[in-house]
Image (spheres, helix red, strand yellow):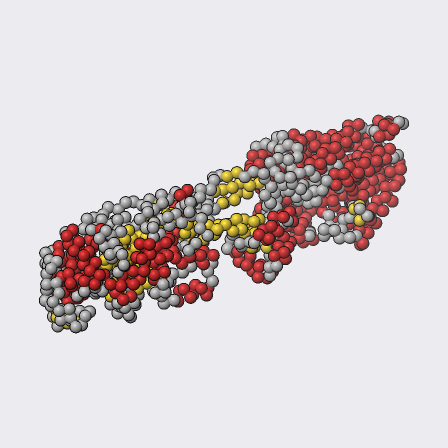
Amino acid sequence: MSPDRDFAVRSRIFRLILILLFLVLLVNLFIMMGPKSSEYKGQALENRQVRFRVRAPRGRVADRQGVILADNLFIADITLPATCLGADGPDSTLTRLMDWFGLPPAETQARLINQKEKGRGRLVLVGNATMPQIAAVEERGRQLPGVRVEARARRRYQYGSLFAHLIGYVGEVGQADLDTTGSFLGYRQGDFIGKQGIEATFEDVLRGTPGRKLEEVNASGRIVGRGTVWVPEVQPGRDVVLSISLNLQNALAEAIGQRVACGVAMSVTSGEVLAAFSNPSFDPNLMTVGISADQWNAWISDPAKPFFNRVIHATYPPGSLYKPVTSLAGLSLGLVDTATELEPCLGGWNFGDRYFRCWKHSGHGRVDHLEAMVHSCDTFYYQLGLMMDIDQLAAAARAFGLGRATTDIFPDEAPGNIPDTDWYNDRFGERGWTRGVLLNNAIGQGEILVTPLQMSLFAARLASGGRTPDPVFVISPPQAERTVEPLPFDPRHLAWCREAMLQVVVRGSGINAALDSIPVAGKTGTAQNPHGEDHAWFMGFAPADKPEVALVLLVENGGGGGAEAAPVAKAWLEAYFADPNRLAPAVSGRATAFATGETP
Amino acid sequence: MTWVGFLIPPGDKKIFFAWLGLCLFGLAILWSVTEPIQGPYKELDPVVAKSIFYRQIVWLIVGYGALLITARLPLRYLDNIAIPFFLTALVLLIAILAIGPTIAGSKRWFVLGPLRVQPSELAKVAFILVMANLLTRSTEEGRGLSATFGTFLVMAVTMMLVLREPDLGTSLVFLAVWVGMVFWFGIPGILLVGAGSAALSAVVNFYSERVVEQAWPWAVYLLLVVAVLYVARIGIVSKVTLLFINIVTGIGIPFFWDKLQPYQQERILTFFDPGRDAFGSGYQAIQSRVAIGSGGMFGTHYLQGTQKGLAFLPERHTDFIFSVVGEELGLLGAMCLLALFMVILMQGVHHGTIARHPFARFMAIGVVTYFAFHVVVNVGITTGLLPVTGLPLPLISYGGSNLLTSSLLIGLLLNVSSRTFDD
């Protein structure tokens, strides 16, 4: 091969290599920008579009007049991307912010690292920022890539402990929930969820649906787009209207004062609960913001159990409050009539080898049925109880709604206990008990247990002749109507019972509940408590001749019902009859109806 | 010669207008990089300062002047100054290692007032000249293999100095130019095959050891080599030598690997698996591909690229400027750009082939190799074909030293082409 030819070949090879190299570039470019282009376009879009999940504002809770009891307070957080704190310490932005806000670097970093480990997307540097802090960030945003001021809603319970047991509280959704059904239901880390009470029961109504916001950002995460696209838009939560009246609830709490006690008042006609308070209570606002360990321990170790809603969770023997049940059972069975006299009360009654005492150890002497009820003569009721069998007595009690949960608003409501033959057989064996239990049952002791809520329904049904439906706590969203089983008692007997209860307040043990202008009917009770001082009961309704409202009060370890519970009832009834809106129907419950709602 | 006549350099007008076209193309892209993005966005700081656009214009004027001069210098004169010029460049390369300031972790620049001068750019010109000089002598004196090895030493020294800065991309330019020019000189085919297969062996063994961490890819490769050698019609000595070279480079690559800077190791590993460091050195590669790919056929239109305008694309005014071309002007724009380079390369090979004087031939092919290497590697990096290493796109990327060097080299090419016409 001549040198020239050789050179020509090399020249051709050189050209060929250049062309081949450029062809490789071109083919690769063609593939990237042709068939694969849409994939890259998607990635470019993903780069600059950030989807923000926007939490729905939680629905509010209002009282029957539309006064807001629980709403949302909007607060601002200053947040940073998680990348601001790397393995080699804070970046310049974080360092600058800590300097501006005077945050102690070591503690702040420890706090942020803790947040990072919890796996949040962004780190909250300052929670509930002040206006100067927000202004500082907004003004100097250019020097602070990725730093944002993010609005966040915090639950606010306007009346704190007054509604803590009823409304409950919200808390951050737990990791356990997220791992199971929570994320399926659309919850994300940091979302709030109802933990107790109405907040929990009406979670689906209150929570709303979070929206998604598309924003365009630059490489440092700063929002640069002019427009915001929502897919989908936020659906705010709907409001819940309670049957409770703020004014009457307040009156109840004031009447109870410092006592360890609870009370329930309900409308005799509608079954709407107007007030339900259990003392001591707690401040639910502290539960939503992260309570201190000290406060938590104080509540948990308090023997008066502030988290315990006595209205629905506590069960007590009804004591003498039960006597109308025994009377009505005896009357309906024809065992006695309204004027029957039994053996005189000499301070007790012998059954077998046991002597059952009347509360009045000196005895009531000769009493008829009415006087026995008015003065709560145990001896009379021992005799009356022994005339029937245990199932007949239990049936009379159940007709009023005792022995079962009365509402589905509070899923953990205690059902109480109305014992019958089966129950005793289960408990003690068929031969393990005698008719002697009837003596205790007839005066509301022994194994009978009731909640204050059940007793208020009992009082209301006595007052209405059985027309009161099961207790209603929520007006809106509308709840399914409950059918009311008519009482299996003669209306004349019920009327007699009401008359007897009027006499109790006029001249009997309930005289401390009497009002000056309004006739009040009632019954006092003293539930024997094997663990300590007796519990004081009062149940009643007013006005006695045309009942509007039924009320039950229980003072734990209070002693005698007439002395301890009746005055509290009186105080509340005075407030009730002083309230001009007491008979006003509840608001319809739409958010627009909350004209009076913006209370401080 | 009139004024206007002076401004039009002698020689191949295709090359001159391709150069002019590329320079204007580059200025247009730089303008876009320094403008706020257009679209549904708030007025955004483009981050890359507008001043670099004006600086680039100044450098272009300087480069144009250099081009006008080098296009007219007598070849004899260039041949004569080649060796002293190269020695000066070597001294500068040593000096920068000794007394140069460390900027961003490397010693690449001398700072002269507002200017940063990169001696390695100057060395590229000097290297092409000295290679042409040495190879011309070897041609005239009828030397063969000894010229190859002699120039190899010259190349290796230069390359090592630049590698120490460290600047891997630039150091490879010397290797590439040497390969191109020695090939032009006439290197035995067996040597090229040997070098090529050695490089391949190194890459495959690296892949085996560091990427998949299993021996089979390299084993398969060696078996393939043995099979090819078995059927090849070459002497037994050549066969054994080839096999030996393959084994030695394969085994030697881990030692070379340990000599690399950690960031270079990381970049190479990331090249094989960009996801391993999606926010570090893989970030540039990923964002660059996204920018180019999302451009599609016609691009997002001038000034409207989001990868560029929202600053997702790093180094968008320098090494990754081709990604902006791809994003905003699409496949069409990228092809136009490559076509302009192709004009220079093809015309360059043409003049390198027909030039009468060997010095002119070698110089032309040196310049062609320089441009080819820069363009192929830069575009290869931005499109993800090659691992990320810093290498500008000549005449397009911002940077005075490179624009000056590239224009000056174009001037040399024009000089060669003018001889083929009127020498």
The structure residue drawn at horizontal position 74% and vertical position 44%, both measured from the top left corner, is: B170
**In the visual, does B330 lie left or right of A392?**
right
**In the visual, does B45 lie left or right of A176?**
right
Could you say which quadrant of the image residue B300 lies in?
Answer: top right
Q: Establish if A192 lies above or below A296.
A: above
Q: Establish if A415 lies above or below A358.
A: above
Where does residue A435 sit, x and y in percent of width and height?
13, 64
Where does residue B423 sit, x and y in percent of width and height?
87, 28
**In the visual, does B194 lie left or right of A495?**
right
- Asked whether residue A438 appears in the rendered view, the answer is no
Nearer to us in this view, B124 or A434: A434
**In the visual, does B197 lie left or right of B115?**
left
The structure residue drawn at horizontal position 11% and vertical position 67%, both measured from the top left corner, is: A366
Split into 4 quadrants, where in the image is the N terminus of chain A? Answer: top right
The structure residue drawn at horizontal position 50% and vertical position 55%, both measured from the top left corner, is: A118
Q: Establish if B389 lies above or below A256.
A: above
**Residue lying farthest to the front in this orientation:** A517
Could you say which quadrant of the image residue B315 lies in?
Answer: top right
The structure residue drawn at horizontal position 24% and vertical position 63%, both measured from the top left corner, is: A511
Nearer to us in this view, B314 or B334: B314
Where does residue B1 sit, x and y in percent of width and height?
89, 27
Where does residue A497 sit, x and y in percent of width and height?
18, 56
Nearer to us in this view, B12 or A420: A420
